[in-house]
Structures are given as structure tokens and as C-alpha cells.
Image: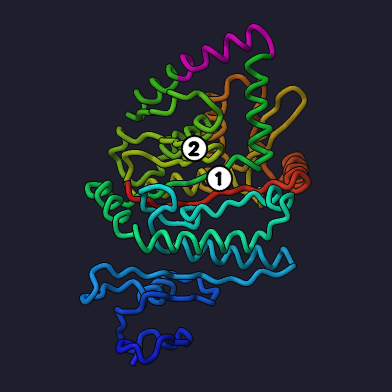
Amino acid sequence: LHKEGKISTLIGTRSLLGEGWDAPHVNALILATQTGAYVTTNQIRGRAIRIDTNDELKTASIWHIIAMSGEMGTNELILADLHKRFKTFAGIHANALSIESGIERLKLDIDEQALKEDEVDIIEHSNNIMEQRLQDDIFNLKERWTHALEDVKEHSFKSGLQFSTKSSKVLDNFSKYVAHARAKTTFIIYSWFSSLVYNLKKLLSLRNDDGLKSKMYENDDYLSKVSNVVFYTLNKLELFHHKERANYAVRIEEVEKEYFRFSLEGASKRDNDLFLETLSQLFEPLERPKYIIVVHFLGQQEVFPVPHHFGVNRESAEVYLKIWKDFFVEFNKIELLSTYKDLGREYLLKAKAKYYAEQNEMNTRLIERWE
């Protein structure tokens, strides 16, 4: 009846799944569920994205409906479920011809303050954008997918960590410390501008020891240094699964202003995922790390967790500390503290209080993309 057009709308629950029916002519699907599970999400989506042999130009629109309340805490949980769902499948980017997972590809970033000043309803504004995109996609979706698939024909699906520094006060402060370290004295200025040479020498010694390369020192900044600290520590502790690591190199792309994407070039998926998992722990809120790194400069301190792979014991944490010091020679004191002891616990509690007082909103997402 639905295929013949006698029924235009079907309403049901997840019990419709797996019942043996197939409806390739379905061209619209509205999901009013909070499920984020991989299997269920893709089973439901599969009802609309089937190929219709009678219509080669068929496209399907899938609407993900969420209800927002006045309770911000509730909204955050609902949005977290939606983010989880979008991690389970890939699609074409809203503005670019790239194929990737994650809700970020929809480019839903809305300047709430600007909209409030103009007395514009945020939800209505967002819905209007979605409706306009639907109208545009009806006419050019096939062409966009064709071009996107052509671009990635010889490529593979790779994972990357996308990170925003926009509202991270911790890294904003740390970057300022790095900038201050450049200009503290003539000696510091000299040592900073020569630190590229120094660190290249250090990298050469690491390369000689471990057979590694790094492409990150084309840009000598704190993000590249932090990511390389993680990279070289993983290698030094022999945590990578593949023995042939000579071509591994950290890659950072600024995908847009203050948004960066990290990946481990030349690595297997398993090693790349290990690198991203470990790196992400530096950008996330402090929870209960066994050890912390405390960076001192001009009477200020910034605290970073020791990722759990490096904090298994004191010896591995010391290796991590040494590599921190090798890369950040401009700081006069970097120390490793156990949070099981009074001083470490004190720094951890202060860092947590500071984090929440400054209302950090860390935006770290694991993105998978064809490239």
C-alpha cells in the first residue's frame, strides 16, 4: 500500500526493524528517538537510504528530532546522545566535498549572542537552515556525492581528533605562557627562536634512537609540541603495535579558525587510534589522573594530566616528564607529581576549581574521514 501511494506515512517504533520488509521507495525518515547505538542507528537509517531501482535519482532526507527544554542540564544530555549517534555513520560535509563522521560536518555552529542581540529565536533559526539545505540538496545532492566520492576514490577512511581552542582557558593560558617565554629576556628570546634548531637536534637524536620522523616542526607552536610529546612518549615506551614506525609523523590541520585536527600520518588505524586516545586526555577536563605535569612560569602554574598509558607506574611517567622537558626548554620548571600525595592532590584540586570557575568548554571530537 505504501509503495502504491495509498499510504503516505508510516508511524512505528524500533519493532518495525528486522521484520523482513523492504521499502526502497521511502524518501523521508523522521527519527524521534534518543538511541545512539551503532547497530540500531544504522538499521533505522537503512530504511530510507536504500537504492530504488525504479528511480536512479532517488534521494532520502533523514530528520533527527530533539526536544529542547528550559533545563540546560537536560539539554546537554540530549545533545550528547545526538553527538554519539552521529559518530556511528559518515556523510557529506555541509560546506565541503569531504566525507566524514560526526555532527560537526553539519556546521550547526550558531552565534547565540549575536542571535539574542537581534532577537532571533535560535531553534527557529536552526530549523530554517535545515529546511533551506533540504531544498538545495534535492537538486544537487547526487552531484555533490559524485564529486566527493571521486576525490576519495584512492583513499581510505581515517580517524582524526578535532579540537577547538575557542573556549579552552587552560590552553589559552598555556599559549600565553609560551608567548611570554619568548619575550622574557634577550636570552629567552634567543633560546626561543633557536629552540626550533635545538628541538630539531633533539628530534634527530630521537630519530637516530628510534627511527622516527616528525613533520610538525614546520610550525613551532605549543599544539605541535604537546602532540609530539605524546607521539615520542608512546614510541619510547614501545606502546605502538607496529614495529615499522619510521614513517609515522604527527599531522595538524587548522580546519578553520581555532579548530585543529590531529592525526598520525603513515600509521596503522590501531596506532593512530592509540595516539588520538592518548592525546585527547590532555585536552579533556581533569578527572582523577594518577600523575600530573605542573608547568611553572612567572609565578603561574598550569596542570596537565598524565595520560593513563603513561601513568601506569612512576618509571613510565618519568619518561613522559623527560620528553616534556626536552620539548619545552623555555620553561624554568616542569615537575611530575603524584595525586596520591598532598602536594599533587593540592595542585589537582586547584586546577579543577580553576577549570570550572573559568567555564571551560572543551570541544574535542573523534572524527573519521575519507582522505
Q: Which mark is residue 307?
A: 1
Residue type highlighted by circle 1? Pro
Is residue 270 in sight in this rendering?
no
Q: Position of residue 216 (x, y in %)?
A: 43, 28
In this view, 145 is above or below 293: below
Q: Position of residue 215 (x, y in %)?
A: 38, 28
Q: CA distance from mark 2 to mark 1?
A: 9 Å
Give the residue pinned by disc 2: 230
Is residue 362 in sight in this rendering?
yes
In this view, 308 is above or below 301: below
Q: Secondary structure at mark 1?
A: loop
Q: Residue at x 37, y 70 (%)?
A: 60
Callout 2–callout 1 Cβ contact below 8 Å: yes
Count of labels shown? 2
Residue 198 on the magenta span: yes
Residue type highlighted by circle 2? Val
Q: Secondary structure at mark 2?
A: helix
How many C-alpha atoms fall within 10 Å of the one at disc 1: few (<14), some, or many (≥20)?
A: many
* Magenta-highlighted residues: 184-199
Q: Position of residue 8 (x, y in %)?
A: 40, 86
